[in-house]
Amino acid sequence: MELILVRHAKAFDRDASAWPDDSRRPLTAEGREQFARFAKRLRRLVPSVDLVESSGFVRAWQTAMLLEEHARWPKPARLERLEARDNAEDEAAQLSAMLRTVAALRAIPVVVWVGHEPSLSRFASLLLAGSADAIAIDVRKGAALSLEVESSRERDDLPRARFRWMLTPNVVRRLTKR
């Protein structure tokens, strides 16, 4: 299974007066435009996706919808466990739930998850090295990270992964200038 982790595109800065509920904070116009170009490049790299799941937070959901529109990937479904957490206890439960979900989805060839930092990079570290703190991964806003989740012979084994590639908005900008 290929698991592609996508961090939401550039959103407005936190502002409690504009968005008292941070989950409602949207993408900026620049973020939408940049990510639309990014999604078209992703389509070339990954032409076929089987499942797209996203945090329900507005900025992540808008990013997932841009993937549907510009990469022509499937319509996203909400996956609550991808939503940002406020404390370490919640994050530990979140990462554990994400592991169980990946284990359940291993038969699906290409899965895309759209979410937030630091949970995406910590989850990638957990899959790659067995610990959320083992590898420092910088998943920039609007970036995508591809992992190959190994299929296990044992049903109860924790999923493990191998790094495949990472594409960042800066790389796409450089490619489109050529």
Image: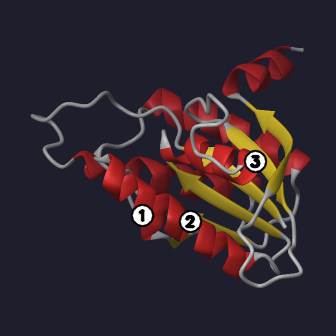
Three-letter code for the amino acid on which mark 2 is drawn: Met
Residue where numbered disc 1 is placed:
93
Q: Secondary structure at mark 2?
A: helix
Q: Earlier in the sequence, mark 2 or mark 3?
A: 2
Residue where numbered disc 2 is placed:
98
* Quarter of the figure with residue 1: bottom right
Three-letter code for the amino acid on which mark 1 is drawn: Ala
Q: Secondary structure at mark 1?
A: helix
Q: Secondary structure at mark 3?
A: helix
Residue where numbered disc 3 is placed:
128
Where residue 48 sits: x, y (%)? Answer: 86, 64
The quarter of the rendered structure image containing the C terminus is top right
Q: Residue drawn 48% across and 39% down? A: 118
Q: Residues within 10 Å of mark 2 (few under 14, many from 20)?
A: some
Q: Residue drawn 38% across and 51% down? A: 84
Q: Find the distance from the CA under tag 2 to the CA under tag 3.
A: 14 Å
Q: Is residue 55 left or right of residue 108?
A: left
Would you place residue 101 above or below residue 16 in this image?
A: below
